[in-house]
Amino acid sequence: MTLRFPETFLFGTATASLQIEGGDSNNTWYEWSQAGHIKDGTHSIRACDHWQRIDADFRLHEELNSHTYRMGLEWSRIEPQEGVFSEEALNVYRREIEGLVQRRIVPLVTLYHFSLPLWFARMGGWNHPQSALYFWRFVQRVVGHLGDLVQDWITLNEPNIYLTMGYLRGEWPPGLKNATAPMFDAARRLVEAHVLAYRAIHLQRPDARVGVAHHLRIFDPTGGPLSALSAYLHERIFQDMFLQAMTRGRFIAPLGRGYPLGKEKFADFIGVNYYTRDMVRGKWGGGPLHGVLLVKKGAPVNDLGWEIYPRGLSRIITRLWKRYRLPIWITENGICDARDEVRPAYIASHLREVHRCIQAGIPVERYYHWTLLDNFEWIEGESARFGLYHNDFETQTRTLRESGRFFAQIARTRSLEVPS
Ligand code: FCB
């Protein structure tokens, strides 16, 4: 059976600046690598050396027949010191985006994806009372420089993951553990940062499409009322809280209440980063969420042990559509699979769910595979391989994987063969 995607549907890949560029020592992940936190001992300073290889790397999108590309901008390059903007860095990005546009590849630009300039982090990062204003100033500058070329923007990537890893688990910068009050404080400022950026982009470019790339997963209870309660709390605090605030301006507990920033629409699409599901087992005293997260017994998993659960994608899309009635872009979906054994099937099974939603009338408009090429995967370093291209980090040789060929064919034909 052939599944056909609409002619307007766009296929592409996603990356983040810090994870591919290399060469920048002015950001929080440089310091975090320096401090020896990366599990395999690698360092963000190397990554894919993309900053020096922008021209050569256009070929990667061409071979994949991509219609679009989600790329990030590194704030620490653009504003290396507080209030000082680098025309040079902005021009590098400008040339890169021009190169995409010339190749008819639609750019989708992420303004913040986990790494922060050191000056900003030293002031307290997202806990600084004016942090949203600093971000707003940066965004205005960027849109002033690139707004003629870029219509589609992601303000923030996965605020929930950033806060969980950086404020609860202490595994990412700023390295705090169980810092609940500072975490909710930072969450409020991130919402404010998104809202200010949303308005600023629209002021400069009224036809812009602006949204957040939300990390959404499935939380399924293992059984019994306490597990059900815990799954509900996880869903609410880990995702709905952010979705409601960043889509409609509505604050729900424990973030706050009402519409402190105005009752408006703050998103033109909902970005979905989807990877996996957690099973939630209730446990009194398992923290305020009363539960522990488990992997379903016997379920297929990726190299990092995350369950492969394609059905979760359509469950999430359907829920979002019912609640928000906004177009949905899959801004990330992919698998850590160094041997590329499961990736083709992973792509097919997840696209099948996307297709099912489109058939049901839901406007899912884009699919970005995470990721273009193996890169610097945060604390996992270079060892976790998510790329459609294999990357040899020593020689920076990119080699198309079998899954990449498969993806290229799907993008070219906008269709997918599946067993009926
Ligand atoms: C997402 C991140 C992305 C990458 C993938 C594997 O949570 O947005 O940068 O780490 O996971």
Image (tube, rainbow, N blue to C red):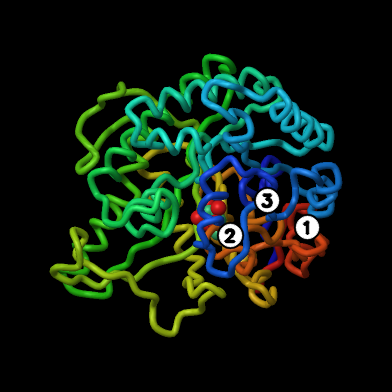
Secondary element under disc 2, as helix, strand or loop, is: loop
Image position, residue 19 (x, y; %): 63, 52
Q: Which residue is mark 2?
A: 377
Q: Residue furthest bottom?
A: 298
Image position, residue 134 (x, y; %): 46, 25
Q: Residue 377 sits in which quadrant? A: bottom right
Q: Residue furthest front?
A: 35
What residue type is disc 3 on? Ile
Within 8 Å of ligand 1, the CB of disc 3? no
Task: State left or right for residue 278 relative to residue 141.
Answer: left
Question: Which label lies toward us, 1 or 2?
Answer: 2
Q: Residue 295 sits in which quadrant? A: bottom left
Residue 304 versus residue 260 in the image, above or below:
below
Toward the viewer: 21 or 341? 21
Q: Residues within 10 Å of mark 3 (few under 14, many from 20)?
A: many
Secondary element under disc 3, as helix, strand or loop, is: helix
Task: State left or right for residue 17 relative to residue 117.
Answer: right
Q: Residues within 10 Å of mark 2 (few under 14, many from 20)?
A: some
What residue type is disc 2 on? Glu
Whether residue 314 is visible here, answered yes or no, is yes
Task: State ligand 1's quadrant.
Answer: bottom right
Toward the viewer: 220 or 120? 120
